[in-house]
Structure formats: C-alpha cells, structure tokens
Image: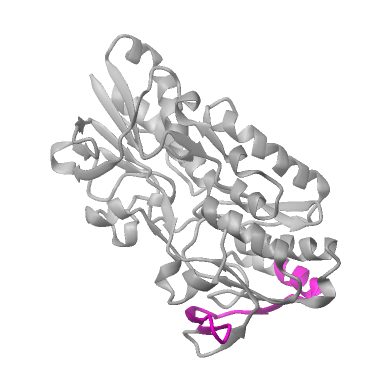
Amino acid sequence: MKRILIVGGGTGGTILANNLARRLRHEIDSARASVTMLSASARHMYQPGLLYVAFGKMAPSELYVDQKTLLDPTIHFHVDPVESFDLDHNEVKAKSGKTYGYDYLAICTGSRPVPASVPGLMENAHHVYTEDAAVKTAEALRTFEGGRIAIVTGVPHKCPMVPLELTFMMYDYFKDRELLDKVSFTYTYPIGRIHSLENVAKWAAPEFDRMGVRYETLFNAKEVDGVQKRVHSEEGSVVEFDLLIAVPPHKGMEVIEQNKLGTSGWIPTNRATLAMEGRENVFVLGDTTNLPISKAGSTAHYEAEVLGENLARLATQGGAMRTYEGKVFCFIEAGKDRATYASFDYKNPPQPRPPTRAIHWFKLAYNRLYWNSVRGLL
C-alpha cells in the first residue's frame, strides 16, 4: 500500500487531499493506497474573509466550516498536530504521541504573522491576519473620528494585495462616514515602489494619487514608539500616526523551525516539482515553501493540482509528469464596489486591468464559492 500523508489542513492540503482521493479512487477502494491528513484544527478558516470582518462586511462565524465536511470520506482525518519530523525514517510524531508513517509526505503547514519581530508593532498596531486581530481592527475603525492613519507593510507576508486593499477600503469606509476631510493616509512599502509586483505598483500609484494617499517607499519598519505615535524605519525616516494599520512580517510555522526544516519556517522547495530540496518523497505546498512567488490561496490551489496529479502517478505508475509554473491569481479590491485582478507566473508578470464592478461582484461570489473550490468541485 502507498501511504500519502498530508500535514496541514488549509487550502493547499485540503485541495490536495480531495484531488488524490478522486484520482486514486480505485487504489483506495482496493487498499492499495491511502490518504491521511493531520491538522491542528477541526475547523477550516477562509482566511481572505478576515479582511471583510475588519470592515464589518462579514461575521467571524462566516469564516469557518468543519474540516471533515470538506474532505472526501475516504480520507483519514485526524486533529493531531505534528510535533516532529523524521524524514530519514519516513515518519512523523504528533501531539497525541502517535507516530504516522508514509511513503509520500506533503507539508502544507502555512505561515503566521509575527508583529513582535518589530519592537512596538504588536502593542500599537492593528492587522487582519487572525480573527481576534480583525475584530479589534473593526472596532478601531468604527471608533476612529479622524487623524493620521499609517499603513505599514513588512515582508514577507501572505495575501500580497492586502496592503493595497486595506488602503482602498479604508478610504471608502471613511468617505461613507463623511470623515475624509478629517483623515490623512500614509502608506509605506519596504522596496522602491508601492508594491512588490512592478505592474501592480504602476497601476496602484495613480490610484493613490487620485485619492490623496501619501506614500513612502524604501521604508522598513525598525520600531514603533507608541508614546510619541511614530514609526521609525531602518532607513532613518519617521511616519507619525493616530491609527496604525500593519501588514506584519510573516514566518512559517514554528514546528518547521523547531525541526530545522527551513530558515524562518520556509522549506527549501524545488520550484518546478515542489519537492523539498534533497528529498525525493517529501513535497511542500503553499505558504510553507521558500519559492519566489506570492503567498496566496491561489498559489496553494494551483500547486495542489499539480502535486495531486504527480503524486497519483507516483503511487500508481512511478513517475511524475507535470511541473508547477508559478501560476498565481489574486483579486484586488480597489474600493467603492470596484475590483481588478493580477494573474501571473514565473515568466509572465501581471497586467492589472481597470477596476470594474463586475470583478468586484465576482470576488464577493468567490467568498461563497470557496468551500466548493477546496472540495474539488470547482
């Protein structure tokens, strides 16, 4: 029997598990293959929805579905987070004390925000990367009556369009509250343009100019002075604020660092095959990789489809065929019921189109269609 073990129950892991269950149906039914998932949670969160929670457009309860309901019934699902990896002996040990063996392993443990990596950021800034943080951001926005808003971005971070979306959505939020004349926006970004993707930056800068959003590039946050309400950069500049909204730096999950699988929790990954460097039967998906591509749900989705096909072939025929080409698709909320998107891969940069209402409504529809997507129905 070929045993496939998936560690992590997020977007990539769930799509991969269902993809394999479909491709290996005959082998699973005849006990020649098995698919097992180990997750840290019994619930699956739709993480992009946190942005909408922060603006009162979604309730936190709408973010969750029981993970087991998303999985094909042939998948062995356990809420038993992995604590140690023994890759030389093809096994992992989980929190329960149980050891799980495998023939093929897929690691898709995700990433986490680490605002504490910038002194003062955790105590003085709001963000949208956890449920608790998004709820607190919603309250901060609701009670803010005017002043200086600073949007400070750290790298790396997941959901590459979030800094832009936060800015566009806050602009409209305060416009609707008739407070724009009492609010000023300063947006910072760590490199020499306002977004890591050059064509996205070229599209967004005129939008910011139109809205009167001040932006400062080459701004890497060094520390936050909560008393003086100032953010100091590594480059020596200072941004003042009354409300600080952060896109905090991210790391991979602690278990990856603790097991020394990759610096800062990012596992060295072959960009084409998604195999862990130096391991033929260990693969990596989504935020957990160190690939030079955006950390986004669509990244994990496209990777999972490639890996699903390849693992199924490895389990039945002994040879992988497909390669991952770096494909990513990101919606961009551009404010006031308008949205655009960025579609790109390793070789082809994005070409954002002018925002439209139609794309905005399609993005909202996808918020509901997501659950069918991870089930493998879309």
Q: Nearer the viewer, residue 193 or 53?
A: 53
Residue 59 coordinates in the image, percent (x, y): 65, 43
Q: Is residue 351 left or right of residue 349?
A: right
Residue 167 coordinates in the image, percent (x, y): 69, 65
Q: Is residue 15 left or right of residue 372?
A: left
* Residues rendered magenta in the picture: 204-232
Residue 306, picture quadrant = top left
Q: The N terminus lies in which quarter of the figure?
A: top left
Mark count = 0
Residue 133 coordinates in the image, percent (x, y): 54, 57
Name the residue at 46% across, 66% down: 249
**Residue situated furthest top in the rendering:** 30
Looking at the picture, the colour scheme in use is one colour
Q: Decide if residue 26 is in sight here.
A: yes
Inspect the magenta stretch and tell me whether residue 206 lies in it. Answer: yes
Inspect the magenta stretch and tell me whether residue 296 lies in it. Answer: no
357 above or below 183?
Answer: above
Q: Is residue 63 left or right of residue 112?
A: right
Q: Nearer the viewer, residue 20 or 227?
A: 227
Name the residue at 75% across, 74% down: 146
Name the residue at 42% across, 41% down: 323
Q: Nearer the viewer, residue 144 or 165?
A: 144
Residue 8, picture quadrant = top left
